[in-house]
Image: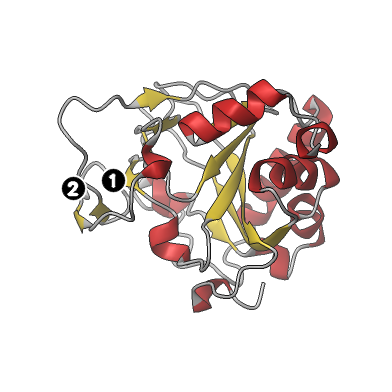
Amino acid sequence: MIANEAMLTDADVQRYERDGYLVVGQLFSPDEVALYRDHFTQLRGQGSFPGDLVGVEPSSGDPLKRYPRMIHMHRWDELSRGWLLDERLRRVLAGLLGSDPYAVQTMLYFKPAGARGQALHQDQYFLRVQPGTCMAAWLALDPCDVANGCIQVVPGSHTWPLLCTERADTTASFTDVTVPIPEGTEIRPVIMQAGDVLFFNGSLVHGSFPNTTADRFRRSLIGHYIQGDAQQVSEFYFPA
């Protein structure tokens, strides 16, 4: 019933329930992807905006300081808000969550050539949703592969409890926390084309590779959602 409304097959839902993530191919058209990519690149070129955790440093040797991520753009940018509430996303999210979603965050990662990756982590550690967990919709704005720093996931880890964090190696990760996983656990790269959307459970252990290319971005537009009947979310995400 819900799967049909969400444009998902029963096999899609079963795969998500087993692995904790699902890629929906070409949910957004090439023209839409180009619009988002150009829009946010232009905004970043204008300097800092509300929600930025750090300022833009155009002359920095650190590519992540030249192109820092953007956060909570939906609070002041109409295009971001429209994407966050897009009906295609809502239908897939409802099919996977089992109820209508409530949007709480937008993010835009530029990840230019030479950028560090992100250590393994769980989004629920930051959002602290109760009851239940959060879910991410991660739109690829560029082709994503291991070389330019695609997402990597630990399939099935959404069934694990919230893990205790430890300090990450900040020479390899732009964030300073990570989670330990058992030796021999599969870590799977998620290869995507521009326009694909990765949906994943907030308890799924995931991170990203560094961008080791000389001239390629790995831009992505991300929304975080909670179940509409959730009672609690971390203060940073409220009000949405």
- What residue would you read off at disc 2? 169
Residue 24 visible: no
The answer to whether mark 1 and mark 2 are in CB contact below 8 A is yes
Binning the other alpha carbons within 10 Å of mark 1 as few (below 14), some (14 to 19) or many (20 upward) gives many
Residue 73 falls in which quadrant of the image?
bottom right
Q: Position of residue 166 (x, y in %)?
A: 18, 56
Closest to the observer, 206 or 174: 206
Identify the secondary structure beneath mark 2: loop
The label on residue 173 is 1
Q: Is residue 175 above or below residue 138?
A: below
Name which residue lies at 84% across and 37% down: 5
Query: Extreme front residue here?
Result: 1
Closest to the observer, 238 or 212: 238
Instruction: Give the total of numbered labels.
Output: 2
C-alpha gap between disc 1 and disc 2: 6 Å
Judged left or right of residue 152, residue 98 is right
Q: Position of residue 122 (x, y in %)?
A: 38, 51
Name which residue lies at 73% across and 47% down: 94
Binning the other alpha carbons within 10 Å of mark 2 as few (below 14), some (14 to 19) or many (20 upward) gives some
**Amino acid type at mark 2:** Asp
Residue 167 falls in which quadrant of the image?
bottom left
Query: Extreme left residue here?
Result: 183
Name which residue lies at 45% across and 29% down: 150
Identify the secondary structure beneath mark 1: loop
**Amino acid type at mark 1:** Ser
Judged left or right of residue 227, residue 181 is left
